[in-house]
Image (cartoon, coloured by chain):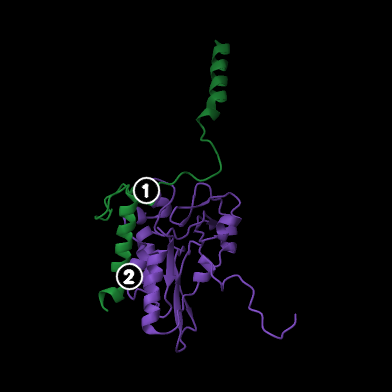
Amino acid sequence: MMQRISLILLSVAALTACGEKAQTLGTKNDATAFSGASNAFVAPGWQAGDKNSWEQHLRARGQYGMNDHSRAP
Amino acid sequence: MARMKFICDAERCIECNGCVTACKNEHEVPWGVNRRRVVTLNDGVPGEKSISVACMHCSDAPCMAVCPVNCFYKTDEGVVLHDKDICIGCGYCSYACPFGAPQFPSQGTFGVRGKMDKCTFCAGGPEANGSQAEFEKYGRNRLAEGKLPACAEMCSTKALLAGDGDVVADIFRNRVVKRNKGAEVWGWGTAYGSKQAGQAPAKVEGVKK
């Protein structure tokens, strides 16, 4: 009986490390910005996953929002 | 797309600190950490100049070069980001950065220095785009939401420009031509490289070494 209990305890102790997360260097893979965000704040007018659509949307947003000379020449 | 870049027009900045407030509010940045701040030269003297400063997402980022745990990475758009799960808060990046961008929150009873925090160009971090985990560590990911950085979009005088380098350079060039005076685009050469930045002074004729 004692042998069985000690064997179980030893097995538990030996397998503890298996549950630990790997500590590896290097950053995780980050998703691209044009793939969109999973929340309710995504601006309308472009297609998530379409890089060209995202680029054109940001260009238009930049021109409209920041180029006051184009709005009031 | 070209690289994402910041330009601050010192001719337009009125030191309102709207960009600082927008950044702090958007990302719920903790007390004591300023991802963006406004610096004024000759404050109170006629002709004073102000400039809004944050991480410039340098082309050849010195923070990336000195990080001992290699926690930095650069996105396809040229935005310099870091992984807080890897950062050890050593502060080397803070010494290397010419803009004073890296910030370290002091938390706990003894003000223990936490992991580095800096401007993300509103591009979040390595966690899933728009997730709660990303927001809690890095703030909002506005780029993935199809928006530009909050600081620039909130700037009342449009002194701070952010976005595709070609677009912001065109807007700025147009301004300089129209007002017919100096560019005052401080930090651009240091961050993105130019003939002026990091090069020996021009030789003067007739002067021996």
Q: What is the secondary structure assignment of the residue under circle 1?
A: loop
Distance from the alpha carbon under mark 1 to that under mark 2: 25 Å
Q: What is the secondary structure assignment of the residue under circle 2?
A: helix
Extreme residue in the top direction = A1
Label tally: 2
Which residue is found at the position 57% from the left and 60% from the top?
B62
Q: What residue would you read off at disc 1?
A: B129
Q: Is residue A41 above or below residue B186?
A: above
Q: Is residue B80 above or below residue B188?
A: above
Q: Which chain is green?
A: A
Q: Is residue B118 left or right of residue B160?
A: right
Q: Classify 10 Å Cα crowding around label 2: few (below 14), some (14-19), many (20 and above).
A: many
Q: What residue would you read off at disc 2?
A: A66
Quadrant, the C terminus of chain B: bottom right
Q: Are marks 1 and 2 in contact (CB under 8 Å)?
A: no
Q: Is residue B193 left or right of residue A71?
A: right
Q: Colour of chain B?
A: purple
The image shows residue B162 at horizontal and vertical percentages of 39, 66
